[in-house]
Image (cartoon, helix red, strand yellow):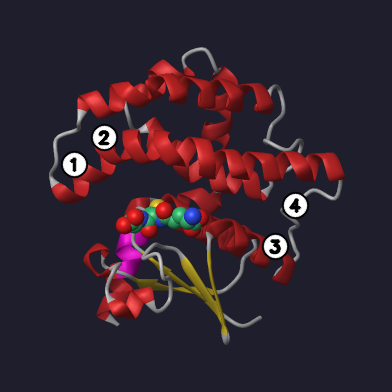
Amino acid sequence: MSEFLVHLTPGSPFARSVLATLEEKSAPYRLAPVLPATLRAPQHLGRHPFGRVPVLEHGDFRLYETQAILRYLDRIVPQPALTPADARRAARMDQLMNLNDWYLFQGVANVIAFQRVVGPRLMGRTPDEAAIAAVIPRARVVFDELAALLGAQPYFAGERLTLADLLLAPQLDFMQQTPEWETLTGAHANLREWLQRMSLRPSMVATSWTRVAAACEAANAA
Ligand SMILES: N[C@@H](CCC(=O)N[C@@H](CS)C(=O)NCC(=O)O)C(=O)O
């Protein structure tokens, strides 16, 4: 199988989903680090006109948008399958992936995790408490719904790991590093146990911010 190239900035939860999927598939890949300051530079805009990461390259095929990348990887490297064969379980997986992008990331994680984790760590910023407080009602709806959809299942679409788990885990791992995690998951032991289970997977261990940052430094030095 030919190698995959992943353009990313360390710490990106969307990029981590791509890396964790590659790890689950034991697929060969290389990292192409993009400095945050160069996301809007012509070279990166040539790969991703919206100036974001991740971007995947596979031979002469280039692709951005994490859901599209994850589904491509699942088709091109079929084992282990990360999409349920059952239509209803597959629909649940799709629903959760959209919930991640539209309701968890947009307006919840991109505010709370950014203010609490990314801003302080990368830019030395102080969290904007008013901005965080403003999104808590929406965050409660998202977390209550995630817990309801997970229910007593080990994974979001049932008995087996799917792309939905791999898209959600990096976002929720970020959220776990904030004090809001306690508030939002205090009544949702199932969600906390799921993240614990996900965090122990070798694919998640191998793609922590620290590990990816070290791999990016090595790639830059090479
Ligand atoms: N819809 C995109 C979202 C990607 C995204 O928002 N990536 C973030 C990092 S997690 C990014 O590139 N942020 C840089 C910026 O907005 O300047 C996807 O699914 O790939």
Residue at mark 1: 120
Q: Earlier in the sequence, mark 2 or mark 3?
A: 3
Residue 212 highlighted magenta (yes or no): yes
Tell me if label 4 and label 3 are in contact, CB under 8 Å.
yes
Q: Earlier in the sequence, mark 2 or mark 4?
A: 4
Q: Residue at x 61, y 83 (%)?
A: 2
The answer to whether residue 161 is seen in the rendering is no
Residue at mark 3: 74
Q: Earlier in the sequence, mark 3 or mark 1?
A: 3
The amino acid at mark 3 is Asp
Q: Earlier in the sequence, mark 4 or mark 1?
A: 4
Tally of numbered tags: 4
Q: How far across and down, in percent of the image, does residue 58 sit? A: 57, 79
Residue 9 highlighted magenta (yes or no): no
Residue 83, numbered label: 4
Within 10 angstroms of label 4, few (less than 14), some, or many (20 or more) residues?
Answer: many
Q: Quadrant of ligand 1?
A: bottom left
Mark 1 Cβ inside 8 Å of ligand 1? no
Tell me if label 2 and label 1 are in contact, CB under 8 Å.
yes
The answer to whether residue 155 is seen in the rendering is yes
The amino acid at mark 4 is Thr
Tell me if label 2 and label 3 are in contact, CB under 8 Å.
no
| First to last magenta residue range | 211-216
The amino acid at mark 2 is Arg
Image position of 112 (left or right of 151): left
The amino acid at mark 1 is Pro
Q: How far across and down, in percent of the image, does residue 163 sit? A: 65, 50
CA–CA distance in space, label 4 to label 3:
7 Å
Residue 116, numbered label: 2
Q: Residue at x 35, y 75 (%)?
A: 44
Q: Camera-side residue: 140 or 184?
A: 140
